[in-house]
Image (tube, coloured by chain):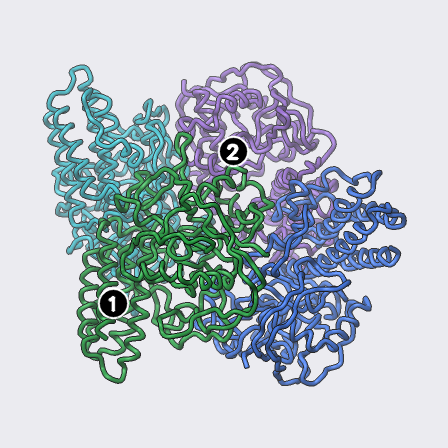
Chain colours: A purple, B cyan, C green, D blue
Amino acid sequence: MDALLARYRTVRATSESLAAPLSPEDQQVQSMPDVSPTKWHLAHVTWFFETFILREFMADYAVYHPKFAYLFNSYYEAAGPRHARPARGLLTRPSADEVIAYRRHVDRAMERLLSAPPRNSANRIAELVTLGVNHEQQHQELLLMDIKHVFSCSPLAPAYEPTTASDAPKNGGAGGDTLDWHEVEGGVRGIGHAGDGFAYDNESPRHDVLLRDFRIASRLVTNGEYLEFVEDRGYERSEHWFMDGIETVRANDWRGPLYWREKDGERFEFTLAGLQPLDPDKPVSHLSYYEAAAYAAWAGKRLATEAEWETAAAASEPAAESEANLLESGRLHPAPAPKKKNRPRQMIGDVWEWTQSAYNSYPGYRPARGAIGEYNGKFMTGQMVLRGGCCVTPGGHARATYRNFFYPHQRWMFSGIRLADDR
Amino acid sequence: MDALLARYRTVRATSESLAAPLSPEDQQVQSMPDVSPTKWHLAHVTWFFETFILREFMADYAVYHPKFAYLFNSYYEAAGPRHARPARGLLTRPSADEVIAYRRHVDRAMERLLSAPPRNSANRIAELVTLGVNHEQQHQELLLMDIKHVFSCSPLAPAYEPTTASDAPKNGGAGGDTLDWHEVEGGVRGIGHAGDGFAYDNESPRHDVLLRDFRIASRLVTNGEYLEFVEDRGYERSEHWFMDGIETVRANDWRGPLYWREKDGERFEFTLAGLQPLDPDKPVSHLSYYEAAAYAAWAGKRLATEAEWETAAAASEPAAESEANLLESGRLHPAPAPKKKNRPRQMIGDVWEWTQSAYNSYPGYRPARGAIGEYNGKFMTGQMVLRGGCCVTPGGHARATYRNFFYPHQRWMFSGIRLADDR
Amino acid sequence: MDALLARYRTVRATSESLAAPLSPEDQQVQSMPDVSPTKWHLAHVTWFFETFILREFMADYAVYHPKFAYLFNSYYEAAGPRHARPARGLLTRPSADEVIAYRRHVDRAMERLLSAPPRNSANRIAELVTLGVNHEQQHQELLLMDIKHVFSCSPLAPAYEPTTASDAPKNGGAGGDTLDWHEVEGGVRGIGHAGDGFAYDNESPRHDVLLRDFRIASRLVTNGEYLEFVEDRGYERSEHWFMDGIETVRANDWRGPLYWREKDGERFEFTLAGLQPLDPDKPVSHLSYYEAAAYAAWAGKRLATEAEWETAAAASEPAAESEANLLESGRLHPAPAPKKKNRPRQMIGDVWEWTQSAYNSYPGYRPARGAIGEYNGKFMTGQMVLRGGCCVTPGGHARATYRNFFYPHQRWMFSGIRLADDR
Amino acid sequence: MDALLARYRTVRATSESLAAPLSPEDQQVQSMPDVSPTKWHLAHVTWFFETFILREFMADYAVYHPKFAYLFNSYYEAAGPRHARPARGLLTRPSADEVIAYRRHVDRAMERLLSAPPRNSANRIAELVTLGVNHEQQHQELLLMDIKHVFSCSPLAPAYEPTTASDAPKNGGAGGDTLDWHEVEGGVRGIGHAGDGFAYDNESPRHDVLLRDFRIASRLVTNGEYLEFVEDRGYERSEHWFMDGIETVRANDWRGPLYWREKDGERFEFTLAGLQPLDPDKPVSHLSYYEAAAYAAWAGKRLATEAEWETAAAASEPAAESEANLLESGRLHPAPAPKKKNRPRQMIGDVWEWTQSAYNSYPGYRPARGAIGEYNGKFMTGQMVLRGGCCVTPGGHARATYRNFFYPHQRWMFSGIRLADDR
C-alpha cells in the first residue's frame, strides 16, 4: 500500500504542476464541446476518488460539497445525474483555488484511508486507486491537449510554456532517416493484455488473431512528407478520401493539419510553446482519421490494423521497452531513445497512431458491473483505435497493448501516421 | 451473352413493375436526404448503363440528354460533377414518363450492343452488364425502402400494395418456435467470395479468419420479444446502450422501432400495405444498430461478428442454399422454406441482420481503377455490416458472403436482430 | 349574389388555368419551407371555402374527405390541428387529379349555396365569399412565385411559359426615362381603407398621419442601376448595410438578386420564361429588404414609409387608377399604361415596393373573432410592409391601401425598390 | 473640461466597482453569444476611448497593445477587423488583472489629454468623451445583465451580491396599488431630443407626431398578475400570441419568464442576490416582446407606441424628473420616489418597457460619418423599442427620450410590461 500511496502522491502532484503555468482565466475556458476546462479536469479526477473510493470505503468520510457530484461527474450514468458536458465552461464557481482546496480535502482523506485500509476491502481499494491514478494520468494528457486547443483559439497565440519540450516527440524527429520497412511474418499471434501489470478492461482478454504477412514503416510520417501531400492538392482530390472524409474536408474548409498556420508565405505550427516554424523533420500531428487514411492512399500504402501494430510493437519490444522504461522513470520529457536499424522507431510516446481498426470489444470482453463498468465499453461504437501514446502522455502510462480511441473527424489530440502495407 | 441479355431484360422489367403502382407524385418525393425519389432510381440505374457501358463501348451511341449525367450521377466523383443528393426531390423534370422514355432509349441501345458486342471488349462488357444488373437490383430494394418511408410521412398512411406480401419475411414468422442456439466450433475458417459467380469487390478476397467457439440464435428476434424490451423501459435504461445510442434516442425521442405506431392503446406497424396490427410473431424490423445492440445487451447476449455470421450461414448451407435457390427462381415472394431443427433459420431474405463488425476492407482488398472503383471502397468508414438480405431484396440477389452496410443510426432499411453468444 | 357567383367562377377558373401548364410532378414539390406545392395551393383555397362557408352555412354539406382539414389548413389554430408547413411537399396523396376532384365537389356545393343562400346569413356569406375569392387571388400570386422558385432549383431551368409575359412588369420598363422626383407636401393626411369596396382588415381603420415634406422617385430602380451598385462592390461594403443585412449577405454568400445568374461573363435572369438575358431597363426584382435598404443608402437616398407611399399613390390617383382599372378588366397582362410626366409611374402591378415601415396594426385595429381573425393580425411582428402589387398579382387585386408584408431576408416574391428622400 | 474629467473619473471608477465582487473566472465567461464577459466589457469601453479619442487627438499616445484593437472592437466595421462576437469568452488573455492595467494606461493618458486639450479640437474631444462616458454606462448595465445570465447557468445559483438591492426596481413594487389608467389627449405632439443635454443620435431630430386619445397604466404589471396569465395556460393558448411568438415558445419550451424557477411546488426568481422567493408585488421582468404582447392581448389591452410612452412620460414630467434627479445624484440605488395619484408611476429605472414600435430612424435622421456613425443606425431593423431604463441602468443615464432596442425573442435584459389602451 505504501508504494501505491507514493504513486498516488506523485500523480496528484503532477496534475497540479501541469496546471501551475495557467491563470484562473486559462483554467476556466471550454473552447469546444470536446474540450474541458483545466479546472474541471482537476476537480473531476478528484471526484473519481471521492465517489468510487472514499464514499464507498470510508465510513466517516464527509463529502466536500453536496453539488460537486453533479458538477464533476463526466459520464457515469450509474453515478447519478450530471452537468451537461458542453456547459462545463460555464461553471465559474468553484474557482480554481476552491478546486485546489477540494483536492486537499480528498487527498487528506485518501492519505488516511491508504495508511490504514479496512482489511477486507484493501485489495479492492488498491485496485480502484490504481484505476484512479491511471484515470488521472489520462486527464493529464487531456489537460494538455485541451489547453493547446484553448490557446489556439486566441489571436494572441499564447504559449503554455517557454520551450517546445512538452510538444516534442519523445523519440525525436526523423533525423534524416529514410523511411524503411519492417517485415512481419503472418500467423496466429496473441494480442491484448495478460499478466500482473495494470491495464484497462478494454485491453482484455488476451486472445489469438490471425495475421497475414505485412510490413510496417520504420518511423512516423513527417511534416515534410505530409506537406508534399498538401502541395499535391491532396485536400482536393477526392479519389484518395473516404466519402465521409472529403465531405468533412469540404464542410470545414480544411486545408492542412489542425494547427498548421500560414503567414506571409511561411508555414508555422501552433504548439504548446506558441507559434513555431514548421519543422519538416518532426512527425506530422493533429490529423483526423480521414486525413491519415487519405495520406496513406495517396502514398499507395495503408494504415495498420491494431493487431498488426501491436504485433510489430511486441516484435521490437526491446526498443519499445527501452522507450517505455525511460518514460516510466517519471521524467515527462526523457532524452530520445537511441535509434536501432530495421526496427520500427517512435512507437511509444511520439504521436498517437491511427489504425484502420474500429474500436470494439475483444472477444469475450465483459465490462465490470456498476458505474466503473461504464469506463470503456459504452464508447465502443463509431470510433477508431489509436496506438502508441504521444508526447503529452505521462511517462509510463502507455504500453504496447494500450487502446486509445477517437471519432474519425477528431484531431485535437496528438495524432499522426505510420504507414503499413501488404507483403 | 444471350443469357445476360435475358437477365438484363428481366431486371429492367422488374424495376418498372415495382414503380407501376406509384403515381407521378409518389415517384417525385424525397422524404429525407437518405431517400431518393422512385423516378430518380429508375433514371440513375439507366445512367449507369449509359455511362459505363454505352458511352465507353458503343461508338455511335447518342447520349439521350446532355444534362442527365449531371442529374443522375449518384456519387461517382470520377464521372464528373453531380446534383446534390438532398436536392433530388426538387427535380420535377424530367417527369416519370420522360424517365421511362430515357429507359427505352438506353434499353434499345443495350439490346443492340449485347446482340453484337465488339469482340475484344465482349468480356469487359459482360462484366459491366453483370455489375449493372446487380446495381439495378440494389436500387429495386432501395426503391421499396424509400417509398415506404415516403408513405410513412403522410397522415393518410397510403399502402403501396393491397396485401402485405412485399413486407413479409421470406421465411415466415417465428411460427411458435422457441429460440434455440446453434453451436459453432471455433478455428481457422475461410470467409469471403471466391469462385465464378458474381460478387461485389468488397466480398473479396476470400481469406482466413480465426474464430472462437460461439453460438448463434436459431431464428430472428420477434416483434413480441422486442416489445418486452420496450415495455421493460428499454429505451430509458442507459446501461444497455452505447453512449452514441442513448444520445440518439434522447435527441430524437425514439420510443420504439421506426414504423411502430400506437393508437388508442393498440400497437400497429406501418408496412407497404399501410397500417397493420403489430404481429408479435414477425421478426422485428427497422431498427438502428444502437437499438439492436441495446436489445442484445438487455437480453444478456451480443450480436455476431460478420465472420461468425458467414460461418454459421455456410454451416447451415443446405438450408441457406434452399432459401437462396427459391429466391433465385425469380419469384420475389417465394413460399417459406421448410423449418429444420437445430439450424439457424431466416438467414437469407427476411431482415438484414446487424453484426458488430464495422465495415472495412478485407485484407488485400484493392478497389478497381476509375469511377467503378468508387462503388464500395469509399464508404468503408463509420458504417456497420449487415448480413442476409431482407424481404424486399430481389430474389437471388443476396448470398452468404454479401456485405451490406449502414450507419449505426439509420433504420429505414429492413434491419433486425439475431442474437449470438460466447460458448 | 349573381355577380359574386360570377366572380367566384372566374377566380376559381383562373387558378386552374395557372396550374394547367404544370405536370403532376411540378405541382408536387416544395423547394423550401416558405414555398408550397401548386397542388397544395389549389386544395388549401378550396378548404377555405369548405371550412368557413360550406360547413358553417350549408346544413347538408358532406365534407369531401375527413383528413383534408388536417392536410390543407395553413395556419388557423382555431380551425384545429394541421400538417406541418415544411412537410407539405411530402404529401403525394391526394394527387393533382384528386385535388381537382375536390375542387369540383366544393364548387358544386358553392354554386348550390350561392344560388339559394339562407336568408338570414346571406350577408355574412357574401362577405366570406368575397374574402375567400380575394384569398384565392393571393394564392394565385403565391403559386407563381413558388413555382418560379421550384424551377429555379433545377439545373434544367425549365420555363413555366414560353413568353416572358407573366414575369414582365405591368407598366413596362423604364423606357429610357431618367429618374425624376415627385414632390409631396407634408401635413396631416388620411391613409387606410374606408368605403364600400373590399379590403383586408389590416387596411383599417382609415386614420390620420402626420407627414413631413418628401419626394419620391418617378419610377422604380432598374436592373441596370442595381448592377452599378453590385459592380461598385455593393455587397461587400458594410457601411451601406444594416448589421442583420450584411450578416445575411455573408452567411448566404449573396452577390446579387435571387435570380441573377452569370454564365461565361454574361448576365442572365431566371424568369417564368426560363433563363433570359438581363434586361437593364426592367425594374430590379427579387430583392430582400436588406438589399433594398442598402441600395438606397448607397444611392444617398432612403425608402419611403408606407404612409408616404400611399399618399404619393393617392396623389397620382388618376394614373394609379387607370393602372388599376386596366387590371380590374380581368386581363392578367394588360398593356402598359401611358406614361405621364412628373408623376410616379409603375406604382401598381410591377414589383412590390419595400417600405421602411415595420408591419403593425393601424391605430384602433381589432382582429375579427374566431379563426378568420387570424388572417392578418398574428403576423404583425418582424415583417416589413411592401406596397403596390407586382406583375403576378391578379388584375384588380392590388390597390393603393393594400399592405403586403414579408420578413426582411425574404426575396422569392417579386420585390423591388422605389427611392424616396427628405425635401 | 474639469466637470467632464470628474464625470469621466466617476464613471470609470463605477465600472470597476461593479466588477469588484467577481472572481477572474466569473469575469471570463460568455454564457451565450448575446452575453459578453465582464472583463471584455471593461476592456472594450477602454478601447473606445483609446481608438476614438487618444489615437485621434493625442499625437504622442502609445497604443497599449497592438492586438487589443482586434480583440476589443465590438462591431465598428470602419475601425478595422475584429474578433468574432460569440468567441469573446475564449480570450483567456489578457487576464482580468491585465485589463485593469490597460484601463490605468488609458486613464492616465485621458487625464493628461483632458487637462490640456489641443485648442482647436477641444469641443470635439468633449463631445466624444461625453459619448464615451455614456457608452461606458451602457456597458455597466450590460455587465450586470450579462453576469446575471452567467450565474443563472450554474447549478450553484451564485449571488452577485448579498442583498437584492441591485435587482430591485428603483421605484419599489406595486405596494398594493390597484392598476389605474392615466388618460392622455391626442393631437400633434413633439417627441425626441432637443436642447443641450446629451442624447444619442437615435433620439433626434425632435419631431411632431400625431396621436389619438389613449390611456396608459398607472404602474407596471406585477409578478402576481403575470402569474395569473401563466396559470390560465397563457403559454399554450395561441390565440393571444403572434405566430413568431408561439413558435418561439414551443421551440424553446418556455413556460414563464426567463428567471422564474419552480422547486417543490414553490416559485422562485433567480436574481443578482441568488434564488429568491417570487415576490408577487414586484414588476414582472425578463420577458420577451412576444410574452409582453401576449400578456397584453390576454388582458384585453395593448402595449403603448413609443410616441405614446414618451408623451405620457412628459405629461408626468415632475414625477419622472424627480425619479431622474434622484438617479442623477449618482447613487445607484436611490430611495423610491414618493407615489403620486393618477400619474403613471415606475416610468424610469424599474424595468425596460416594451413598446409596440419597431426600432427605426426618426424622420430626418442621418447617422454621423465614420465609425461613430455605426453606433445606432445599423441596428435599425428587426428590433423593438423599449423605454424607461431599469434597475441596473446607471443613475442619470436614462431619460424620457431614451430609446433602447432588442430583438423580440430576447429577454435577458430587465424587460417588463406597462399596459395601454385606446380611449
Please name the residue shown 21% across and 65% down the image: C9
Q: Secondary structure at mark 1?
A: helix
Left or right, D369 with reference to C44: right
Which one is nearer the viewer's eye here, D190 or C344?
C344
Amino acid type at circle 2 is Trp
Location of the N terminus of chain B by quadrant is top left
On screen, residue D293 versus residue C128, left or right, reads right
Instruction: Chain letter for mark 1, please.
Output: C
Q: Which residue is mark 1?
A: C7
Can residue B297 be seen from the camera position used here?
no
- Who's the residue at 13% across and 36% down the image? B10
Q: Residues within 10 Å of mark 2 (few under 14, many from 20)?
A: some
The answer, for residue D63, to whether it is visible in the render is yes
Q: Position of residue C291 (x, y in %)?
A: 50, 48
Q: Position of residue B361 (x, y in %)?
A: 37, 30
Q: In the image, which disc is placed on residue A254?
A: 2
The quadrant in which the C terminus of chain B is found is top left
In the displayed structure, A61 sits above or below D278; it is: above
